[in-house]
Amino acid sequence: MPTSGENIWSHKDLLGIEELTREEIELILDTAPQFVAVSERESGIKKVPLLQGRLVVNWFYEPSTRTRTSFELAAKRLSADTLSIAASSSSSVKGETLHDTLDNIEAMHSDVIILRHGAAGAPHILAARHKSHIINAGDGRHEHPTQALLDAFTMRNHIRALRGDPNAGLDGVRVALVGDIEHSRVARSNIMCLNKLGAKVTLCGPSTLMPACIERMGVDVTHKLKEAIDGADIIYSLRIQLERQADGLFPSLREYIRLFRIDTAALVHAKDDALVMHPGPINRDIELSTSVADGHRSVILEQVSNGVAIRMAVMHLLVNSGRKSR
Amino acid sequence: MTENFSSEQEATIVMDQATMADTLRRLAREIVNDNESLEDLALLGILRRGRPLADRLAALIGEMTGVTPPVGSLATTLYRDDFRGGIGSAVSKGNTHFEFNVDDRTILLVDDVLAAGRTIRAAMDEVMDYGRPRRIQLACLVDRGGRELPIQADYLGHSMATEANEWVTARLQEIDGEDGVFLTRLATEAEGA
């Protein structure tokens, strides 16, 4: 339980894991459990009044069901009013700039903007000029900070339970990130988050899906699944973006499955208590076999539940103790 | 808001260990006399120092009647009204946790120091989100005055009038290693400058 959490949060926006210190990441993780409890209330109202009367706008330029739903639910459980703008139905198709669109949203007194955009840095550009709190819900191949936070929260909960230590952190915990690293903002945010929390990250995937010089981020790289899984506490499978196959980045799906799919056979090399995670949506039997995705090691649905709590924590911190304006 | 006081500040004892023990025993007696059906009674200690006080009251009620009411913890953090001005911490001192249903029960809120009454307002709102208690009561160790809401304790240990620059702090064995209530006079801005 944090005892000196006051005043260490000073961010107006959540743009990426890169901007956060270890202490700030831990503050978010420590703020989340009370929100897990709100969602788990068996009797009574699954809602708290922390963002009552605030306007939270979900503004998504890329398709997303999971993240958008999770943010919307998080805002609703904080009693905020929510609004969704899909890019396909907004004036962006008529040529309006991001700044102009946000000026118009802010003219209706928005408080929090959840932005997903295909261009890396889009939320940063908006945050510098607008007074709403901006949360990056994925910008190009750059970052997806709330995904990394909910992943770290899920990992930490399990490490604490496994070790019977309610204060255990991720120091020294071994995490294998497997799949398409090149196109994955989830991988990038997770690498930074896990590094800051003291975990040891190993990346695994075909060399065509592995960014050059990624070792500079402070990770190990292997192209053999067995090596990545051996000794890992957490095996994190990334989604293979099937649309990439057309780009010729891996010769055949069958080859990818043979070499990199996480299935029961591959898990023979894993520790007995190793966890399997995936950010969703899963390509069943491509990056992850059905028996593993639904198996006892999988905490994939817990990631989804924790996502709501982490997003509640982030919005609460930004609005109620963050910097009021730029 | 802090419970620490530096050594330069004079702390006056308002309630020593023996007086606190007597006071809690008296409060437990009043609670027993006032509640015909103890089976319906449940105590919620407001974190942090309300919780050990609730545990002690429940144990005393158990000694007196043979019925020990269930005890839970209330964080109130998610219901506070002081986030908007930027004051208050976003991080809870602990999580709300209780294993009884509040519907149709008498819920006794327990806190150490009653002042503005805003914590109690938050606590009532939080309890109501879990169901519909038959009634909610309040037990406090000390009332230091300075109310900002129409709230009063049903069971009160000690009442005192204080100035704005005076701070009343309860210290409890379970958390602070000693029992007592102290009055601290804080340096005013004029004096401090």
Image (cartoon, rainbow, N blue to C red):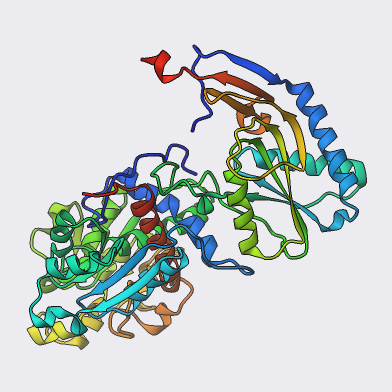
Q: Which residue is at the front of the view, A196 or A265? A: A196
Give left or right: position of B53 versus A178. Answer: right
Give left or right: position of A27 versus B139. Answer: left
In the image, residue A69 sits, relative to residue B51, either above or below, namely below
Image location (x, y in percent) of residue A65: 32, 80
Image location (x, y in percent) of residue A312: 41, 61
Give left or right: position of A158 versus A126. Answer: right
In the image, residue B144 sits, relative to residue B191, either above or below, namely below
Q: How many marks?
A: 0
Give left or right: position of B68 versus A258. Answer: right
Residue drawn 19% across the image and 73% down it = A180
Residue drawn 18% across the image and 62% down it = A123
In the image, residue A127 sits, relative to residue B146, either above or below, namely below
In which quarter of the view is residue A177 placed?
A: bottom left
Image location (x, y in percent) of residue A63: 24, 81
In which quarter of the view is residue A61 placed?
A: bottom left
Residue B128 appearing in the image: yes
Q: Which residue is at the front of the view, A306 or A35? A: A35
Residue A210 appearing in the image: no
Image location (x, y in percent) of residue A212: 8, 63
Residue drawn 72% across the image and 29% down it = B159
